[in-house]
Image (cartoon, coloured by chain):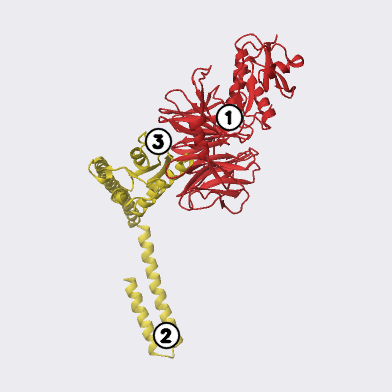
Amino acid sequence: MTMKFFLVAGLVAALAGCASKTKTNADIEQRDLFDQSDRRSFEQTAELTDGLEPASETDLRAQQEELKQEFEREEQRLLEERTKFDEQNSSNQDELQRQAEIKRELSKNDSLLAQRSIFYDFDSSVIKAEFQPVIEAHGDFLKKYPSVTIRIEGNCDDRGSREYNLALGQNRAEQLKQALVLLGARAEQIDVASYGAERPLIFGVDDASRSQNRRSDLVYLD
Amino acid sequence: MFSIFRMIKGFAGIIVFVIFSSHGFVSAQVEIEIIADEGAKIPITVIPFQGEGDQAKLFSEIISSDLAKTGIFEVQGFDKTWSHSKLAADADYTDWASREVQNLVIGNFVKLDDGRFQAAFWLYDIPGQAMSVGYQIKDDPKQIRQMAHQFADLIYEKLTGDRGVFRTKIAYVVRKKDRSSLVIADSDGHNPNEIFVSKEPILSPRWSPNGSRIAFVSFLNRKAAVYIAPVNYKKGRANGQSVVVGPFSGSNSAPAWSPDGQSIAMAISEGGKSNIFMVSLRDQTRVQITNHRSINTEPNFSSDGKNLLFTSDRTGRPQVYQVPVNGGTEVRQTYTGRYNASAHYSHDDSFIALIHYDERKFNVGVQDMKSGVLQILTDGSRDQSPSIAPNGKVIVYASEAKGRGILRFVAKNGRAKLRYVGPRGDDLREPSWGPFIKD
């Protein structure tokens, strides 16, 4: 109500100011008086309100409001916690499901993933075309399951320098790692190691045994 | 080389010494195959020493065996009735000359009151009617083989002008089923002692220049790592716990001692490459020597410490290169064949020993550093890991017989070959020849 009154007063004053460019002192004084009276009445009203019951009622209402807000916050927190719990529960289930899936896929005997070794020519780290599908299968798998980690172990046959073979085995493992990374695996998923000629799969000095020993093994880690 | 093969057929004399270690756990067998050559051999007659007990024969047998195995000496038989009671001053040269003896070794030994042995020998030049060497030593009776080896060293040096290596040690790796051990033995295969044992493979043992340590490679958390074992060289035993150098990330391998024994050059892998670094043993700081996107491994220091040999496949195939340690151009050293590796400088840097692949087999060869001429010394199918004796006259290497790893020795001049076979079930590999012993 006081606002409306002020507006009206202001409007009147403005109109008055506009109406006559030659304002008289009396006009101004009048307007001032008018303003002052209005302010006084407003202050009186305020004083009245402060002094009586409504003050404590406001207090109470504020307290209630605070409690309500606190309650709402608590409720919100519980709700969030519940949601989180539900989410986690379902993600645990997802995770378990994924683990089972990983296990299942890795234990399939007839899949390309079941092939955990690739073989090389003598003194070569070049991945032969025939092993490309196997490598793609492992690369896709590692991309699909970024939590899965492997170790590639490079090996050589028993011919030539043992130290050179150690480096050659390392090279074989590194090249295979690069190939898997190009297929979408993360470098962090793959550890490399070389045993050179020290861990032959087959103890034999014939060509067939040696070709089995020139290999990289993909070892899936728990 | 062709003529050597012909000689094997024509003149090969095979002497087999079967030696059982007194320590029991390894009984090594050394077979000696000595290949005669057109070159004249030095005749020598070693008479059993005077003294009480079995040692009398032992002295002369060890000396004879040491000298015969070089391929340089012709050990001659003797008659049991030949008296050798007259020593030194009253040696009867005409008697010995009538027996067609040219170089005569006689000796004696006594047990001293303090329990030690005192042994002496004399080498006579019969045609020259002169005593060439006379020497006496006192030592623990357990050191009797070492005493005899020392006599052989002195005889060898007097008659050839080169230092003998009969008292030096060799280190090698023994692989049993799931067990590898690093072993030190006398250079004739006696007194083998394990100094490091592991379920993991062991490779590349390398003696420090003074023989007080052996660097080698084994595996730590599935990564190759360089270890150092402290050693008592004279006793041929471990002298403390082995420690790992670094380890630096990646594969650490192929250790090589700098001649001052303060640093080790080694190959360290990073990504798809392997490069050679010098690692200070004082603070384990490292300096990169090679920097190439390829395999660079098997460093080996020249005796003056200025250059390193190494193996690199930068051309697509392993070949041997040389680089100044303090930086400079890497120069390819091998051009014969598509695979040359495991190069080692000789004691005087005049030649290098390496393995060479000729599309059918791996063999040990020596390449003259001046002329670049490569000579193949062996005829196995899978010979590897050559290591040169400190006098440059003999090369020990790993080979195989009936699918088993054995060690073989070949004289640099091709005139003698020895087989060193471990006990049944043992694979012997990765030999490394130790330095001269310091008295």
Q: Are marks 3 and 2 on the same chain?
A: yes
Mark 2 residue element: helix
Contact (Cβ within 8 Å) of mark 3 with mark 1: no
Q: CA distance from mark 2 to mark 1?
A: 140 Å
Q: Are marks 2 and 1 on the same chain?
A: no
> Could you say which chain is coloured yellow in the image?
A
Mark number displayed over residue B71: 1
Looking at the rendered structure, the kind of residue marked 1 is: Gly
> Closer to the camera, B2 or B339?
B2
Q: Which residue is mark 3?
A: A199
Q: CA distance from mark 3 to mark 1?
A: 37 Å
Looking at the rendered structure, the kind of residue marked 3 is: Arg
> Closer to the camera, B139 or B101?
B101
The subunit carrying tag 1 is B
Mark 1 residue element: loop
Residue A72 visible within the image: no
Of the numbered discs 3 and 2, the one sitting upstream in the chain is: 2
The subunit carrying tag 3 is A
> Could you say which chain is coloured red in the image?
B
Residue A174 visible within the image: yes
Which residue is located at x 52 percent, y 34 percent?
A: B7
Contact (Cβ within 8 Å) of mark 3 with mark 2: no
Number of other residues with Cα within 10 Å of mark 3, as a class: few under 14, some 14 to 19, many 20 or more: some
In the displayed structure, does residue A137 sit left or right of residue B342?
left
- Residue B306 versus residue B209 in the image, above or below: below
Which residue is located at x 40 percent, y 71 percent?
A: A39
Judged by depth in the image, the label closer to the viewer, 3 or 2, is: 3
Q: Which residue is mark 2?
A: A27
Looking at the rendered structure, the kind of residue marked 2 is: Asp
In the displayed structure, does residue A83 sit left or right of residue B207?
left
